[in-house]
Image (tube, rainbow, N blue to C red):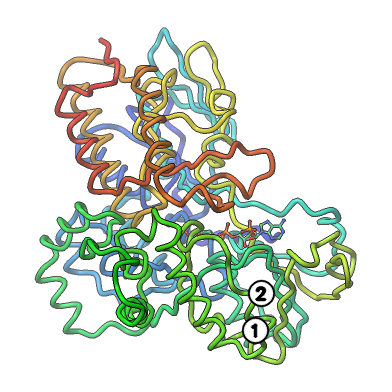
Amino acid sequence: MSAPPSDSQPASRAVPSSVDVVVVGAGFSGMYLLHKLREMNLSAVAFEAGTDVGGTWYWNRYPGARVDVESLAYSYSFSEDLEQEYEWQERYPTQPEILRYARHVADRFDLRRDIFFRTRVNAAAYDEQGRTWRVRTEHGDAVTARFLVMATGCLSASKLPEIPGLDRFAGATYHTAHWPHEGVDFTGLRVGIIGTGSSGVQSIPVIAEQAAQLTVFQRTPAYSLPARNRRLRPDEIAAMKANYRTFRQAQKESGFGVPTPIPTKSALEVSDEERDATFERAWESGSLVNLLTAYADLSIDQAANDTAKRFIHRKIHQIVEDPRTAADLCPEYPVGTKRPCLDTGYYETYNRENVHLVNLRRTPIVEITERGIRTSDQAYEFDVIVYATGFDAMTGALTSVDIRGRGGAPLDEAWSAGPRTYLGISSAGYPNLFMITGPGSPSVLSNMVVSIEQHVDWVTDAIAYLDHQGLTTIEPTQEAEDAWVDHVNLIADATLYPKANSWYMGANVPGKPQVFMPYAGGVGEYRKTCDEIAAQGYKGFALSV
Ligand code: NA7
């Protein structure tokens, strides 16, 4: 895998020995945190492994990478000036456009002066006597902080597949989450790609246009809707800018962080014609949320969900000319229980003569060889292999840091049977440690920017409260954490989510506990709960002087 070249040189300066807050990560969470902490006159530094801000949008530079929430909604709301000034170009911006936005925010709020780039945090240990966190970086620097905030993202610990022979391949290999900054030219090459999640679904059509041959190795098909991306019109940008405050409030109260009418009808109570017309409108709208919220029971009732599944299967069979390929592209798990995708020409790509689908359910990969990929029935030769194989989601970036709480307890051991948090923000035994969009919060089931802002606001309010009250530590009680974990599970079990082998469940990482990690109760409900807990003097947390 190629290492990214540098593109943002921080001024050379020494890491301070002590600050109020250490922030790990300079993606959308870390950036807003730094800004807020400065406004509170707290000292803070952020450590970032990349050479620039942007997090997900810094790393995932694969061809075709786009966000699947609309730009005007997938943007910070904390600064009205920023909202008004910034001009988004596209409905679903590309990775370069989103990275440009992140850089603009970093410049506008002068964030880089408190960020140490090219600096991975290796370890953090809580000092019970000093009531501080001691944080160590890969360069050997150590900094002491009153608070530690992990703004490390839900999808940042990338994953290679567990396939024998990974090192044997003689050609070039790329993981979608570590794409070379200079891009890759596939012209005239024979390319194999493993993985058909969002990264595969977005990159396959673009790679197919360049490559001599593209062979897609699919273990589980994705449900994908056409994005119907386009340039934004000046009038719609102006209308949103005039209405932003109302829109932002609606985002906060919504289920997914994207305002949509709340469905009241069951998919089973309407005629086939009415249902098809509704699904057709959702398909035409280019919005995942419109499909997922078309009926009230799609996420909780198998028979209702089957109606959406049949609709999408029909679409795939209409688009893909070869019936066997079309059948292989049809998922069997309930719609929405693995992360659905938005694409640009994905299914159509399988009608190209240079694209070939290998169904790994029928013919699994046996090994990677020096020349390519061998499945149970054939050896394929490639010049390039692309791994679009995803992430150790939600917990990977947290447990890969050696975090030790009270009594030196390692976080990865405390979470060995699955992540345990209170509100997805904090964990018992780890005082003054906060996670932004951690497991047990809506996070990946929502518009991430909405959830990030809510967590950053809640965490910084909690710090302000402690300082105002002359308190030094905040830590969830074991009872509150246990009750929250039970609540998260109860909600998940009332849905169809646990029916799929998804990264929401940790199913893509061999040996990872199978626990549904995000909170499925919706961002509006979740926010209410967080606000109530704060209003009751941080109920469920032990606060001490
Ligand atoms: P995803 O969604 O986790 O997709 C990874 C894909 O790679 C998925 O199709 C996996 O199949 C496949 N995979 C993983 N390991 C293997 C092995 N060993 N053999 C074959 N196939 C494998 O990651 P993405 O980067 O595409 O997207 C992540 C999120 O970013 C996305 O959900 C959006 O929120 C944005 P599986 O499904 O595990 O059978």
Q: Relative to 264, is 205 on the left or the right?
A: right
The mark nearer the N terminus, 2 or 1, is 1
Q: Which mark is residue 519?
A: none
Question: Nearest the camera: 406 or 163?
Answer: 163
Work out how far the residue at label 2 is from the one at label 1, CA to CA, in angstroms: 19 Å
Could you tell me which residue is drawn at 19 percent across and 29 percent down? 534
Type of amino acid under label 2: Asp
Relative to 155, does residue 348 appear above or below in the rendering? below
Could you tell me which residue is drawn at 45 percent across and 14 percent down? 127
Residue closest to the far top: 129
Which SS class for mark 2? helix
CB at disc 1 and ligand 1 closer than 8 Å: no
Type of amino acid under label 1: Ala
Among the 4 quarters of the image, the one containing residue 189: bottom right
Relative to 152, does residue 99 appear above or below in the rendering? below
Q: Where in the figure is residue 429, as x and y percent of width and height?
A: 44, 18
Label 2 crowd (10 A; few <14 / some 14-19 / many >=20)? some
Relative to 543, does residue 457 appear above or below in the rendering? below
Ligand 1 picture quarter: bottom right
In the rendered image, which quarter contains the N terminus? bottom right
Which residue is labeled 1 in the image? 208
Question: Nearest the camera: 410 or 120?
Answer: 410
Q: Where in the figure is residue 288, as x and y percent of width and height?
A: 38, 69
Q: Where in the figure is residue 270, as x and y percent of width and height?
A: 29, 72
Q: Relative to 452, is 240 on the left or the right?
A: left
Among the 4 quarters of the image, the one containing residue 473: top left
Could you tell me which residue is drawn at 51 percent across and 58 percent down? 338
Which residue is labeled 2 in the image? 328
Relative to 166, does residue 135 appear above or below in the rendering? above
